[in-house]
Image (tube, rainbow, N blue to C red):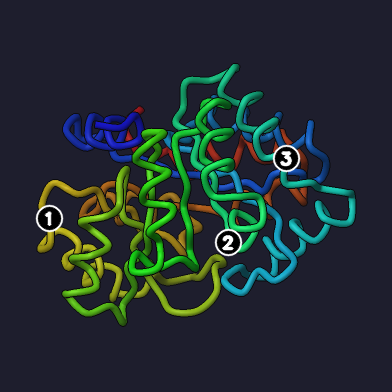
Amino acid sequence: MSKTEQVLKERKAAGKGSLVGYFPIGYPSLEESIDAAVAMCQNGVDVLELGVPYSDPVMDGPVIQEATLHALENGFKLKQVFEAVKAVTSRVDTPVLVMTYWNPVIQYGVERFAKELSEAGGAGLITPDLIPDEAGDWLSASDKYELDRVFLSAPTSTQQRAQVSSDLSRGFVYAVSTMGITGAREELDSLARKVVAGVKLADANQNACVGIGISTAEQVAEVNQYSDGAIVGSAFVRAYAQGGVEALKVKVNELASLLER
């Protein structure tokens, strides 16, 4: 059982629920993003996602796009992913996943990326634009270096597709609650329950965490009633943009407030 899986299962078994939090590496600078990530882990985030800035972020909403563009303009380099992971994991015990589009990993070299991520203490990868059918190199590398691999399951996924995602994911399956780009929404799509149900039908023991559209403590608590964790990104990045690390701490505490700590 991976560290990510263990954390989610232990909190679920204890009736506490989990908050999975996203923050982009290099925003507004490398050191500041590391401090922000550590603060998130220290104030209520149970699993951390560190995002890799990318020039064509087709799944990201405007808040995250703006932040990652800022990081790229400030000179973000892919090797800083491993610096950030190592720095965060040296300060907190929270599982740290890297969320990245697949092209940067290909350019860097799949096995090289996996090796350096493992050496830095990273838990694994979330790959939103990589489907399991085309992930042969990553499946091999993640097995070799014992890394989590988080694939997506969406409202449009067939049960067969949900089965494949469930079978090949390690850590959890990312259950996309709505179609389209990420970003906070006032109401969670009811299809989230359907996506989670599909994952659980495929494998009752597989974790399913719901992302895209979660922005309130009530939504975090509601999602945890039928899934293994709530994923929040835009709300955290927006809080940081408005008030720095102190505002981010407040937002993390706020969204975790209805989960038993």
Q: Name the image quarter holding the C terminus.
A: top left
Residue that mark 3 sits on: 79
The one nearer the camera, 213 or 26, is: 26
Above or below 114: residue 74: below
| Foreground of the two, 147 or 13 | 147
Residue 121, placed above or below residue 102: above
Q: Position of residue 96 (x, y in %)?
A: 50, 35
Residue at 58% over, 61% down: 101
Residue 154 against residue 145 in the figure, above or below: below
Question: Up-down: is 189 above or below 138?
Answer: below
Q: Amino acid at mark 3?
A: Lys
How much space separates mark 1 and mark 2, taking CA atoms? 26 Å
- Label 2 sits on residue: 101
Disc with the residue nearer the chain's start (3 vs 1): 3
Upstream in sequence: badge 2 or badge 3: 3
**In front: label 1 or label 2:** 2
Q: CA distance from mark 2 to mark 3?
A: 15 Å
Q: Is residue 232 left or right of residue 196?
A: right
Which residue corresponds to mark 1? Answer: 203
* Residue 243 percent location from the top left of the image: 77, 44
Q: For mark 1, does the 10 Å Cα neighbourhood hold few (<14), some (14 to 19), or many (20 or more) residues?
A: some
Is disc 2 in contact with disc 3, using a CB cutoff of under 8 Å?
A: no
Element under label 3?
loop
Q: Secondary structure at mark 1?
A: loop
Residue at horizontal 50 percent and vertical 58 percent from the top: 215
The amino acid on which the numbered mark 2 sits, given as a three-letter code, is: Tyr
Circle 3 residues within 10 Å: few <14, some 14–19, many ≥20: few
Between 147 and 23, the residue placed more toward the observer is 147
Question: Which-is-in-front pick, marks 3 and 1?
Answer: 3
